Image (cartoon, rainbow, N blue to C red):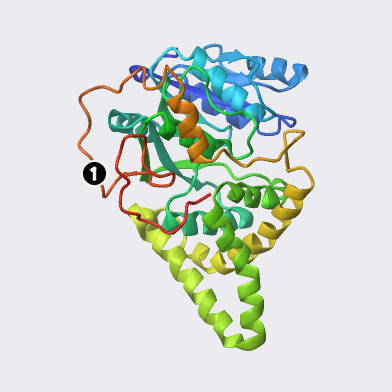
Amino acid sequence: MTSGAPALPDAEYVLPLRWADDRDLPDLAAYLGRLVGWLPVTVVDGSDDARFAAHAVAFAPAVRHVRPEPHPGRNGKVAGVVTGLRLARADRVVLADDDVRYDRPTLVAVLDRLAGADVVRPQNVFDPLPWHARWDTARMLVNRAAGGDYPGTLALRRTALGPAGYDGDVLFENLELLRTVRARGGVVLRADDLYVARRPPTARHFLGQRPRQAYDSLAQPARYAAELAVLPVAVLAARRRPRLLLALAAAACALAEVGRRRAGGAARFPASADLLAPGWLVERGVCAWLALVLRATGGARYGGARLPRAATPPRELRARAAADPTRRATARPTRRATPDLTRATPDPADGPAPGRRAPAPRHALETA
């Protein structure tokens, strides 16, 4: 641990990593060098041998740098996450992708929210904001209005997933993790007011992600049906009543603005991103149909493998959890934080946890 600010108590930072390009290594190494002064950091690195060695040299000596342990499934990130949780020395763990950049106050805040939850789901915001990040911000805003965005970072209790971890043979591993926690009776808290910086990908990488992100929606049938309908509705409106397209575009902009204003987001997201919402919805409508083609040809590519399943249905996960004798073996602290519904909202996406009455629905669609 480096000198400076005192370490955060009972907390650890876990970063699963697998790089084929080290262009961002100086930025990541500098970030980890700051981070390790606040709490222990573990990097679970699945990169090739040469890059693993280069990373070991670049990272601060206090950063624990390890290889992922074997885990069933073709999604290598899941193996990194499960390994990091098994090795964690603290109960409170922050999981984060390599492009996430916490500052200390936000790190403290997201860990504090674990007093009332098993998982806390903050909100990412791109910094800097090139054209493709602004385009993707439109997606974030629509998701915030329709139920919540899925970030590249989560805070969770080390035992929230149980000893088996979660399914490593799905594409949408973020959703799979959240569903697994809920199936075990855990509480997922959506913290829309906690904003965590994220570095945008290159434009080339961003463009390559379009069909894969649409494939994630196969895990959420209601949302996917709505996305499939976007293109037919737009074509029908263009043929019969062209002016209706303007009304639909205005509605998309208004929806994005609802998401932008939610939980203080107007100070974090540019208003210009609202104007890109119609274009993003058309893109998603096209890619939703491409996802069907991918599904018919073996699944979406990720990390050199094809993954046919986006995520496991909640009902199946609940059945697995019911048969697991270790479920809920570790309870949260009995002293729970007083809920602040204007700041953080329990995630309604996957229905009630076992033994709980279903809450009134807040949103029409799950979000991806």
What's the residue at 60%, 23% (across, down)?
A: 80
- Residue at point 65% right, 82% down? 238
**Residue 188 place in picture, x, y as percent:** 38, 37
Q: Nearer the viewer, residue 292 or 53?
A: 292
User: In this rendering, would 127 be left or right of 291?
Assistant: left
Using the image, determine if residue 336 lies above or below residue 136. above
Looking at the picture, tell me which residue is in the foreground, 349 or 205: 349
Horizontally, residue 228 falls left or right of residue 347, namely right
**In x, y percent, where is residue 244?**
55, 83
Q: Which residue is mark 1?
A: 340
Front residue of this view, candidates 324 and 239:
324
Looking at the rendered image, the quarter that the N terminus falls into is top left
The residue tagged with tag 1: helix, strand or loop?
loop
Q: Position of residue 180 (x, y in %)?
A: 48, 32
Residue type (three-letter) at the residue carrying disc 1? Asp
Residue 289 versus residue 299 in the image, above or below: below
| Quarter of the view holding residue 107 | top left
Q: Position of residue 151 (x, y in %)?
A: 50, 42
Callout 1 environment at 10 Å: few (<14), some (14 to 19), or many (20+)?
few
Which quadrant holds residue 21? top right
User: In the visual, does 77 lie left or right of 153?
Assistant: right
Tell me if residue 254 comes above or below residue 14 in the rendering.
Answer: below
Can see residue 250?
Answer: yes
Task: State the residue lying farthest toward the right.
Answer: 297
Report the label total.
Answer: 1
Q: Is residue 29 visible?
A: no
| Residue displayed at 50% across by 44% down | 150
